[in-house]
Amino acid sequence: MAQRNGIPSRLTEAQLAEIDANPPVWLAQSRANRTGKKPVWVELRCDVCGYTEAARPKKWWPTFTYLSCDHHGFDELPEPAEGLARREVDGIGTRFIGIVDEAPSGA
């Protein structure tokens, strides 16, 4: 964005201080959008083997009970608590399946 708006890739301390004190409109808006509520990167960790990977979280991701690599079986994770139903969410990171234990719909 900076390059698009003519800001060089290297700035002096004085230039940086000036931009920080009087940010362009696009920079001010970008800073206002940073609420700190959602991390930009998260670490995904398989609950079976411990494999980790960094990923950008997606808005549609529910809260996972477990994460596992896509090659692990259901039997490698603990059973859902009594009264909860289990569902899988594919497409988490490059190789993960999200496991969500939740109350059955209509319950």
Image (cartoon, grey):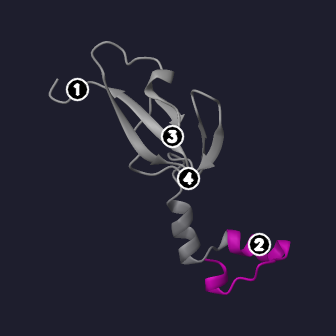
In this view, the mark in front (3 or 1): 3
- Residue at label 2? 16
| Pair 1/2: label in front | 1
Quick one: label 3 or label 1, which is nearer the N terminus?
A: 3
Residue behind mark 1: 104
- At horizontal 54% and vertical 56% (from top left) the residue drawn is 34
| 15 vs 44, nearest the viewer | 44
Secondary structure under the numbered disc 3 in the rendered image: loop
Name the residue: 52% across, 32% down: 72
Q: Which residue is mark 4?
A: 56
State left or right for residue 2 relative to residue 34. Answer: right
Chain part drawn in magenta: 1-20
Residue 2 pos. (x, y %) = 65, 78
Report the Cα–Cα distance between label 1 and label 2: 54 Å
The answer to which of marks 4 and 2 sits earlier in the sequence is 2
Q: Earlier in the sequence, mark 4 or mark 3?
A: 4
Q: Is tag 3's residue or tag 2's residue first in the polypeptide sequence?
A: 2
Q: Position of residue 105 (x, y in %)?
A: 19, 30
Frontmost of labels 4 and 3 is: 3
Q: Label 3 belongs to which residue?
A: 70
Tell me the element at label 4: loop
The three-letter code of the residue at mark 2 reads Leu
Query: Residue 35, percent across and down?
Result: 51, 51
SS of the residue under disc 2: helix
**Circles 4, 2 touching at the beta carbon (< 8 Å):** no
In this view of the protein, which residue sits in the foreground, 70 or 57?
Answer: 70
**Can residue 48 be found in the magenta stretch?**
no
Q: Amino acid at mark 4?
A: Arg
Disc on the earlier residue, 1 or 2: 2
Q: Position of residue 73 (x, y in %)?
A: 47, 29
